[in-house]
Image: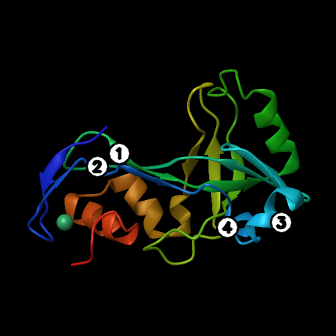
Amino acid sequence: MSFSFVCPTCGDTHEGMPTDHGWKLPDVVWDIPEGERSCRGKFNSDLCQLGDRFFIRCVLKLPFTEQSGYYGWGAWVELSETDFYRYVAIYDKDGSEEPTVPGAIANAMPGYSQTLGMPVMVQFQGSTSRPTVHVPSASGHPLALEQTSGIDNRRYHAILVSTGAVGGP
Ligand SMILES: [Zn+2]
């Protein structure tokens, strides 16, 4: 999905900009020197285990208010061992009727205060979609508000700057 819009912040027309940004691994695993990583942890693009810690790749959706669609943060979320293996068990099945499970964000997301370790709820999806992340509104975190109210083009520009997709103002 891509679209173009005249940016209220920089005045440029942004075209074909990314509508998502993801992390290859949880920060705690990424921080391990590359040569040692695969010895100390097990991981692919959706699942990661480091010792007795378990992570899954999710998507945290922020709906656009001035276009259709959403911005997707492809963050990792740490789950309990039980919930992790439940996800593995239903990985190629429809998990959208499963109860939500608690987790914690495992990436420091640019442009936000303190997301690493932030408590969230995770909803498994159909077999072709990554689980979705819900930030409880009681957290008072900006992500919770953005998830509920959406993001306008000004905020979208700021996100694109924070991820390095466009240059600073
Ligand atoms: Zn801009």
Q: Taking the image as drawn, is residue 50 in sight?
A: no
Which circle's residue, 1 or 4, is located before the other in the chain?
Answer: 4
Could you tell me which secondary element the residue under label 2 belongs to? loop
Residue 127 horizontal/vertical position (percent): 63, 25
Q: Which residue is mark 4?
A: 27
Residue 14 in percent (x, y) is at 17, 56
Q: Which residue is mark 2?
A: 64
Q: Which mark is residue 58?
A: none
Mark 2 to mark 3 CA distance (whole Å): 40 Å
**Who comes first in sequence, dot 2 or dot 1?**
2
Q: Is residue 90 left or right of residue 23?
A: right
Ligand 1 lies in quarter: bottom left
Residue type, mark 1 in image:
Tyr
The residue identified by callout 1 is 70
Name the residue at the top extreme: 93
Of badges 4 and 3, the one in the foreground is: 3
